[in-house]
Amino acid sequence: MTEVDVVVIGAGLAGLGAATALRQAGARAVVLEAAGRIGGRAHTTCPPELGGVWFDHGAVWLHAAERNPLVPIAETTGETLLRSDELRQERTFVEDRPATTAELAAYDTAWDRFSAAAVPLLAPGQPDPPLAAVARCLPDDPWAPTVEAWEGPVICAVDADRFSLRDWHVNQLTGSNLVPEGGIGAFVSRRLGTGLDIRLNTQVSRLHWDTPGGGVAAETPSGTVQARAAVITVSTGVLAAGTIRFDPALPAAVQDCIAALPMGLAVKVVLRATGQDRLDLPLHCSLDRKVGRSGEPFMPFQCWPFGRDYVQGWIGGSTAWELARAGEAAAVDFALGEVRRLFGSRVDRLFAGGARLVTHWDADPLIRGAYAYALPGHADARARLAEPLADGRLVFAGEACHVGLAGTLAGAWITGRKAAGHAMQAACR
Ligand SMILES: Cc1cc2nc3c(=O)[nH]c(=O)nc-3n(C[C@H](O)[C@H](O)[C@H](O)COP(=O)(O)OP(=O)(O)OC[C@H]3O[C@@H](n4cnc5c(N)ncnc54)[C@H](O)[C@@H]3O)c2cc1C
């Protein structure tokens, strides 16, 4: 039996943010993490199939760098931050040819037309429609389905017809995107866990949040941790799966928030080249194509990132779930098909016999998807899930709880720190 002020469940960004804030406030806190590492969805490895270069399986970028609290931490701890946006060049195809100058100009301004069309749909007092309602207001705009595909499945990991327009609107990311050299997961494990009491391989199976003494008790296979308050940072996918039993059961309003914030999925598919051909693309190039219709499966690519010898496709939403169920070979075939439709059979020569890598966040029982989205009509669920229960004795945190930077490392970190404040108050009562 361990006794502390606050027990934190999960050592992803929210858990690390909470534990850091608690340490800074002088509280005794312990973090219980089911996996054998910290970082959660920030996870870097050096896969041999990619020649041993660092590779982020989950998060890659420090988004919205100008307001991202992890950026000053990285800077003051001596991390090198790569300015990915400035290094990147972009190429857009229309069917099997590069877009013309006129087409690119129309594509450039399509984002403004999309945002403008969203404004009346977001008017106060209106019902909260799905994101797909925006493109429906632009039937004659040839680029609206492409913008929709980026904003829905690619960026938010969910199809536009399942996704709250208000949730999309308040969480749009602006500003620069920075990449810590060596990988974001490596940065997190190197810099954000030091000095914290973290118990790895310690899965919480049950949380009593109304013990006779007015505290909480987290049950794990290696014993029980008693505390005055608990911060829960596991994903909404894990909460919905019921792998942590809450005693008493969570109030219906909280269960409704969890159900209103399901996990989207994004799958990365990496194809390593065997020859010298670089498809006439610059190194560190973002490649996309015009999407023909709303809901059409769409996989943009990062080609030769940082001068490497692979392309990396990214697909989100229902097609990502389908490919994840169908297996790695299906995901690789899909990615090859997408590059082939732009470059023809030279793709087969280039990638024949080359290594492949497919990410599997759906299959990780400790995560169960990529990040949470709000269903139409439920944009308020994030803020409601973050409201402390039992005077701060039980507080939820994590990317699903942030409004403004939802689905990001920064959002998770901020919610963790805020939840720590509530838990501290409960611990001091
Ligand atoms: C493919 C992909 C790409 C992404 N790209 C970006 C990006 O470029 N930039 C960005 O900012 N964000 C990105 N994200 C999102 C970002 O990774 C997440 O928003 C963030 O990492 C979530 O942190 P968290 O602390 O809320 O949750 P998690 O990282 O899920 O942390 C929760 C922790 O709880 C642990 N846990 C689960 N169950 C238990 C249990 N019963 N007991 C104890 N511990 C448990 C888990 O192992 C995990 O470590 C991406 C995510 C994915 C999947």
Image (spheres, rainbow, N blue to C red):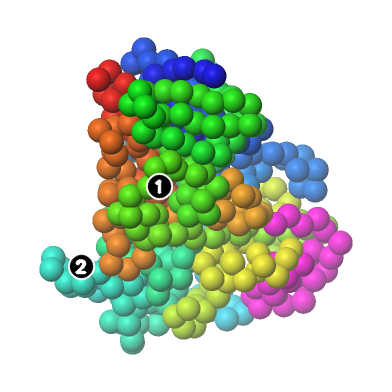
What residue is drawn where x is 76% and y is 57%? Answer: 356
Quadrant placement of the N terminus: top right
Instruction: Say whether residue 19 is visible.
Output: no
The three-letter code of the residue at mark 2 reads Leu
Identify residue for label 2: 122
Q: Is residue 187 above or below residue 255?
A: above
Residue 408 locus on image (x, y percent): 43, 46
- The residue to which callout 1 is attached is 249
Q: Residue at x 55, y 47 (%)?
A: 243
46 up-or-down from 197: above or below:
below
Q: Nearer the viewer, residue 250 or 9?
A: 250
User: How many marks overall?
Assistant: 2
- The range drawn in magenta is 329-358
Camera-side mark, 1 or 2? 1
Quarter where residue 253 is shown? bottom left
Q: Amino acid at mark 1?
A: Ala
Residue 343 magenta: yes
147 or 47, which is in the foreground?
A: 47
Q: Residues within 10 Å of mark 2 (few under 14, many from 20)?
A: some
* 27 in the magenta segment: no
Residue 346 on image: x %, y %? 77, 72
Q: Main secondary structure of the magenta part?
A: helix
Q: Residue furthest top?
A: 26
Q: Residue at x 83, y 69 (%)?
A: 349
Considering every residue shown, the one lying at the far left of the view is 125
Q: For this rendering, which residue is in front, 72 or 231? A: 231
In the image, is 180 to the left or to the right of 385?
A: right
